[in-house]
């Protein structure tokens, strides 16, 4: 079985795969101060709880450089496997047409690799995490570029910490768009507002592409936001884990 690890700024997403099937998945909080031994204990406990005792390969993508080698050592301690790292020079099958391909995050690369294999081209991918990213894959399968903006929770935390009267809120859906109290107004702005932004970006992306595109939404808040979009979207919770599996198979 393959252990795939995607390290984000807020969460570390784990997936254990048997072939193309995801046997189990989970999340750890990202903490740059934890040691390789601490992460190894967490990994070993996760694998033991889910009875995944036959790990024969591992791959890591990360947008947190400080944790790459820490997690690589943790994987070695927990599974005795040398983890593959998604980094410039690794085979992905993805042609990146940006000004500096090395700037494209490993998470964007993994998502694009999976989307190319799973969905019709061209493709727009929205990943909703600490940041909100929108990646565009052209009709020839090339990675054309992206947008990056603040994530939903990042925006909410900034509002709550930077204003005197706005509270911390959970992100349950509001009953209506027009909020009648502070919490519901913030929920509407965060959830409905982000969905409207994605709908608008799809229009702009398709205008530049000159054709309709498949729209895929992933990330920790992907499902909550996606169901509020008016565009036809595909919600794929496991897009990045699938991408890591594909990259691993190309390089093993």
Image (cartoon, rainbow, N blue to C red):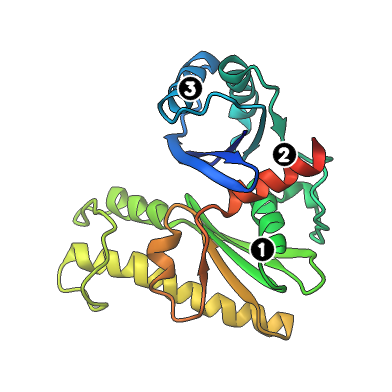
Image height of 22 relative to 124, above or below: above
For mark 2, what is the residue?
86
Kindly identify the residue that appears in the image at 21 percent across and 53 percent down. 167
Give the alpha-carbon distance from disc 2 to disc 1, as whole Å: 20 Å
Q: CA distance from mark 2 to mark 3?
A: 22 Å
Q: Residues within 10 Å of mark 1 (few under 14, many from 20)?
A: few
Q: Position of residue 108 (x, y in %)?
A: 65, 53
Q: Earlier in the sequence, mark 2 or mark 3?
A: 3
**Can residue 63 be seen from the camera position used here?**
no
Q: Are marks 1 and 3 in contact (CB under 8 Å)?
A: no
Q: Residue furthest left?
A: 181
Residue designated by label 3: 33
Q: Which residue is mark 1?
A: 118
Q: Give coordinates of residue 112: x percent, y percent.
A: 69, 58
Give the residue drawn at x 53%, y 42%: 8
Q: Position of residue 56 (x, y in %)?
A: 66, 27
Q: Nearer the viewer, residue 228 or 188?
A: 228
- Which circle marks residue 57 in the picture? none
């Amino acid at each position: 079985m393959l252990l795939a690890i995607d390290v984000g700024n807020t969460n570390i997403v784990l997936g254990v795969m048997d072939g193309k099937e995801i046997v189990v998945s989970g999340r750890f909080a990202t903490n740059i101060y934890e040691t390789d031994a601490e992460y190894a204990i967490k990994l070993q406990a996760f694998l033991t709880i889910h009875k995944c005792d036959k790990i024969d390969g591992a791959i890591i993508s990360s947008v947190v450089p400080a944790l790459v080698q820490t997690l690589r050592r943790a994987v070695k301690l927990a599974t005795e496997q040398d983890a593959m790292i998604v980094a410039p020079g690794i085979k992905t099958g993805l042609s990146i047409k940006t000004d500096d391909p090395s700037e494209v995050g490993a998470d964007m690369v993994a998502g694009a690799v999976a989307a190319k294999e799973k969905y019709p081209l061209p493709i727009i991918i929205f990943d909703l995490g600490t940041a909100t990213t929108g990646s565009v894959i052209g009709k020839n399968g090339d990675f054309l570029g992206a947008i990056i903006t603040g994530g939903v929770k990042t925006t909410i935390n900034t509002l709550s910490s930077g204003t005197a009267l706005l509270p911390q809120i959970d992100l349950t859906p509001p009953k209506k768009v027009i909020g009648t109290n502070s919490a519901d107004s913030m929920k509407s702005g965060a959830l409905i507002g982000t969905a409207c932004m994605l709908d608008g970006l799809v229009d702009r992306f398709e205008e530049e592409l000159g054709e309709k595109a498949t729209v895929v939404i992933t990330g920790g808040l992907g499902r909550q936001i996606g169901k509020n979009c008016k565009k036809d979207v595909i919600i794929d919770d496991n897009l990045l884990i699938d991408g890591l599996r594909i990259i691993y198979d190309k390089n093993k």
